[in-house]
Image (cartoon, grey):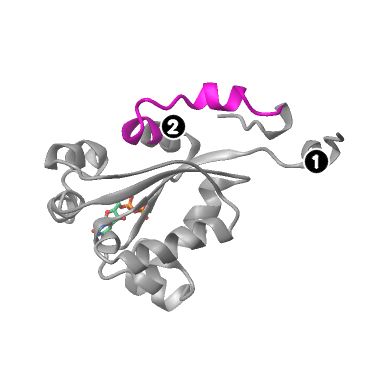
Amino acid sequence: GSLGPLRCAKALQLTLAVIKPDAVAHPLIVEALHQKILAHKFIIVKSKDLVWRKQDSEKFYAEHEGRFFYQRLVEFMSSGPMRAYILAREDAIGYWRELMGPTKVYRARYSSPNTIRAQYGLTDTRNTTHGSDSVESAQREIAFFFPEFHVQEWMERLEPSFRAGQ
Ligand code: UDP
């Protein structure tokens, strides 16, 4: 058959998205976010539910060590189950960050009320979601959550026109 339309498609990019413990505590929120992911035409490449030890949390957020919210963040992220996704889409990183909204929930509610954090976030720490903010952090974070997953191998299996530069 013809592969014409596929050849016109834009390159897929991968991102790491997480539904944080505040939301996983409410199965209906997880369901709503899962539906949102599908409705926005992300491909769910991988997903898993997991619980961090405190040391996982500290390692993942090492760049924030010393910030006023660090201890609170580390405790929160190891306080209960999370759901992690590797998502693929054209401009997946920026698109998922747009859907999430600003880090601080009060700001999200004020400036972007339709975003996930505005709708479901509880506090600046318990803000429902995480998303990689660059190609480099997506690579690091995908490896952190899914050490068995090889981005390069996955990309190489795609039709060339779908391949992004990561
Ligand atoms: N955070 C917080 N208080 C703040 C800023 C951040 O508790 O004032 C938490 C929040 O859970 C946030 C995470 O630390 O999602 C990481 O912060 P970052 O600045 O990287 O924001 P993000 O990329 O998650 O929007």
For marks 1 and 2, give the one nearer the viewer: 1
The quarter of the image holding the N terminus is: top right
Residue position for label 1: 8
Q: Residue at x 82, y 42 (%)?
A: 5
On screen, residue 160 versus residue 132, left or right, reads right
The front one of 121 and 110 is: 121
Q: Residue at x 17, y 48 (%)?
A: 78
Q: Report if the beta carbon of the residue with label 1 is closer than 8 angstroms to ligand 1.
A: no
Quadrant assignment, res 100: bottom left
Secondary structure under tag 2 reads: helix
Q: Label 1 to label 2, Cα distance in Å?
A: 26 Å
Residues at discs 1 and 2 in contact (Cβ within 8 Å)? no
Q: Is residue 104 above or below residue 21?
A: below
Q: Amino acid at mark 2?
A: Gln
Q: Is residue 51 above or below residue 7?
A: below
Quadrant assignment, res 105: bottom left
Q: x, y (%) of residue 110? A: 42, 78
Q: Can residue 12 be seen by looking at this rendering?
A: yes
Residue position for label 2: 139
Q: Is residue 12 magenta?
A: no
The front one of 154 and 143 is: 154
**Picture mark count:** 2
Q: x, y (%) of residue 39? A: 57, 61
Q: Amino acid at mark 1?
A: Cys
The quarter of the image holding the C terminus is: top right
Q: Residue at x 17, y 40 (%)?
A: 58
Over which residues does the magenta segment extend? Answer: 142-159
Quadrant assignment, res 162: top right
Q: Residue at x 65, y 28 (%)?
A: 158
Q: Report if the beta carbon of the residue with label 2 is closer than 8 angstroms to ligand 1.
A: no
